[in-house]
Image (cartoon, rainbow, N blue to C red):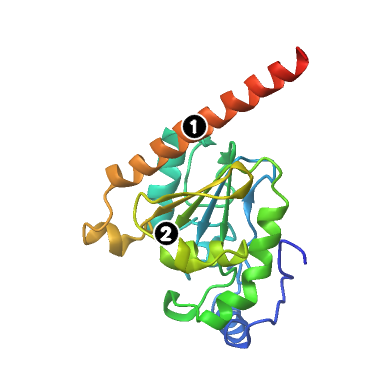
Amino acid sequence: MASEPQPDCLFCPRLADFRRDNRADHPDWFNAPVPSFGFPDAPLLIVGLAPGLRGANRTGRPFTGDYAGVLLYETLLDFGFASGTYDQRADDGLSLRACRITNTVRCVPPENKPTPAEAAACRGFLSATIREMPHLRAILALGRIAFDGTLRALDLKVSQYKFAHGAAHDLDGGRKLFGSYHCSRYNTNTGRLTAEMFRDIFKQIAVYLESTAKEQSQGNAGSHHR
């Protein structure tokens, strides 16, 4: 299975109908499955829930054009996972460094709520996205649905991995799954997630990626001396 759905994907009839209605109402919007942002050689993959109606569904780039993207991209810029300037447009010139962003469900759902069946229908794309990342070391899941969806995409039992903000679980292949509350306006407005709490997750990830990079370089150096 490919890592990206076709622009006219019909796997989920409700989402296809919603996409068609939005295309009629807003013909200048993207209104299609939103592709991943970043390159497959990145060591970090960030997994969100689904495109926002006036965010990624409008702009065509994950987390671009709504409040969640402001917090996410500002944090990525601060930690060196992105370069340039985030201006809430897909053509703002911002680029990712050592990071890739995708969604559990690639099409915008009504009321930002995909059904379990829609998440299951889209799971193959997430599985393929993960498989095509040979240097993947850390996955950050934003919210419980993304967290559970990532586990299912990896054929792991959800019951064996507890979601919590700040959770970190070791996976096969030297990879680690991190959990965070979603950086939505609702979560930040209610205080469930603060900018500092969000930054703390990226501090953990940066330390982990640095340590795995050191281990890999030492291992490579050791192999040259054999």
Viewport quadrant of the C terminus:
top right
- The kind of residue tagged 2 is Asp
Residue 175 appears in the picture as rendered: yes
Residue drawn at (57%, 70%) of the image: 105
Residue toward you, 213 or 8: 213
**Disc on the earlier residue, 2 or 1:** 2
Name the secondary structure under disc 2: loop
User: Would residue 5 be found to the left or right of residue 166 on screen?
Assistant: right
**Which residue is under mark 2?**
66
**Which residue is under mark 1?**
80
Residue drawn at (68%, 81%) of the image: 11
Percent coordinates x, y for residue 115 in the rendering: 50, 81
Residue toward you, 92 or 212: 212
- The kind of residue tagged 1 is Gly
Rounded to the nearest angstrom, the CA distance separating label 2 from label 1 is 21 Å
User: Outermost residue toward the top?
Assistant: 225
- Nearer the observer: mark 2 or 1; the answer is 1
Q: Tell me: residue 33, above or below residue 61.
A: below
The part of the image, by quadrant, that contains residue 2 is bottom right
Percent coordinates x, y for residue 119 in the rendering: 56, 75
Percent coordinates x, y for residue 66 in the rendering: 42, 59
Residue drawn at (61%, 49%) of the image: 172
Q: Tell me: residue 143, above or below residue 16.
A: above
Using a 10 Å C-alpha cutoff, classify the residue at mark 1 as few (fewer than 14 neighbours), some (14 to 19) or many (20 or more).
Answer: few
User: Outermost residue toward the left?
Assistant: 191
Name the secondary structure under disc 1: loop
Q: Tell me: residue 40, above or below residue 19.
A: above
User: Would residue 222 be found to the left or right of residue 201 on screen?
Assistant: right
The part of the image, by quadrant, that contains residue 98 is top right
Percent coordinates x, y for residue 144 in the rendering: 41, 65
The part of the image, by quadrant, that contains residue 35 is bottom right
Is label 2 in contact with label 1 (beta carbons under 8 Å)? Answer: no
